[in-house]
Amino acid sequence: MPRKYDKTRRNATTEAIRKRILESTIHLHSKKGIFGTSWKDIAHHADVSLATVYNYFPSLDELVPACGELMYAIVQPPSLDDANEIFANAVTLEDRIARLLKTLFDFYERGEPYLEVDHQERTLPAVQEWEAYLKSLVDGLSQIAFQPIQPDRRTVEEIGALLDVPVYLSFRRRGMSRIEIEQTVYKLLSVWVVRPSE
């Protein structure tokens, strides 16, 4: 008697292979960059055939967004919907700044292996979408954090630039720990925005 076809098992196997390819790709992208990683590299790292990688992801247009979804799940960025929880019981502006920095820099620390983007990678639509999301997140949380002093749009942009991922990564490349970065940026914001006339 022929063995009954088990669609559930096949689907689980297919999903496991897909996930293995994506995990390998994210790892390689973090080491070599998107354009420095070949399909052959991915196949070797994922221990699958080159044809299998192409079968799941024929081009960067399919691969990069899928990697983005998995990376999002791994690094768990905050959301503007979390603002009430983030700033709950933060009485002073200094408290709100401390909460803002902790939230963003906790996220950057989780995502550090994956957040570096070069000029060429910025030409990819999925990367542009991710960077636009990060900008809106940083600007939105900054606007909420500094609400007590009602910053204008220009001030929010300036704060956002200081809190941007490349700035954080630049500090890290200079050997600063995540806590040291948080303390430094807190001092800068406290002097520049909170007490500008002192």
Image (cartoon, helix red, strand yellow):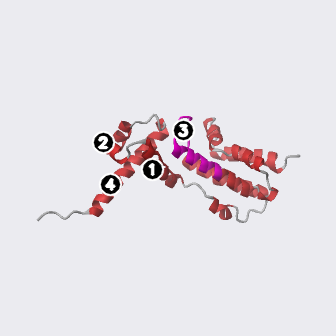
Look at the numbered discs 4 and 2 and tell me whether their residues touch, using CB distance below 8 Å: no
Identify the disc placed on residue 51: 2
Instruction: Tell me which segment is drawn in magenta.
Output: 112-136
Q: Secondary structure at mark 1?
A: helix
Residue occupied by mark 4:
14
Identify the disc placed on residue 123: 3
The CA distance from mark 3 to mark 1 is: 17 Å
Task: Between residue 57 and residue 195, name the one nearer to us.
Answer: 57
Kind of residue at disc 3? Thr
| Residue 126 in magenta stretch | yes
Residue 88 visible in image: yes
The CA distance from mark 2 to mark 1 is: 18 Å
Q: Position of residue 123 (x, y in %)?
A: 54, 38
The tag earlier along the polypeptide, 2 or 1, is 2
Q: Secondary structure at mark 4?
A: helix
| Residue 141 in magenta stretch | no
Q: Position of residue 157 (x, y in %)?
A: 72, 46
SS assignment for the magenta stretch, majority: helix
Q: Secondary structure at mark 2?
A: helix
The tag earlier along the polypeptide, 2 or 3, is 2
Image vertical order of residue 10 relative to residue 31, above or below = below
Kind of residue at disc 2? Ala
Residue occupied by mark 1:
66
Image vertical order of residue 15 relative to residue 51, above or below = below
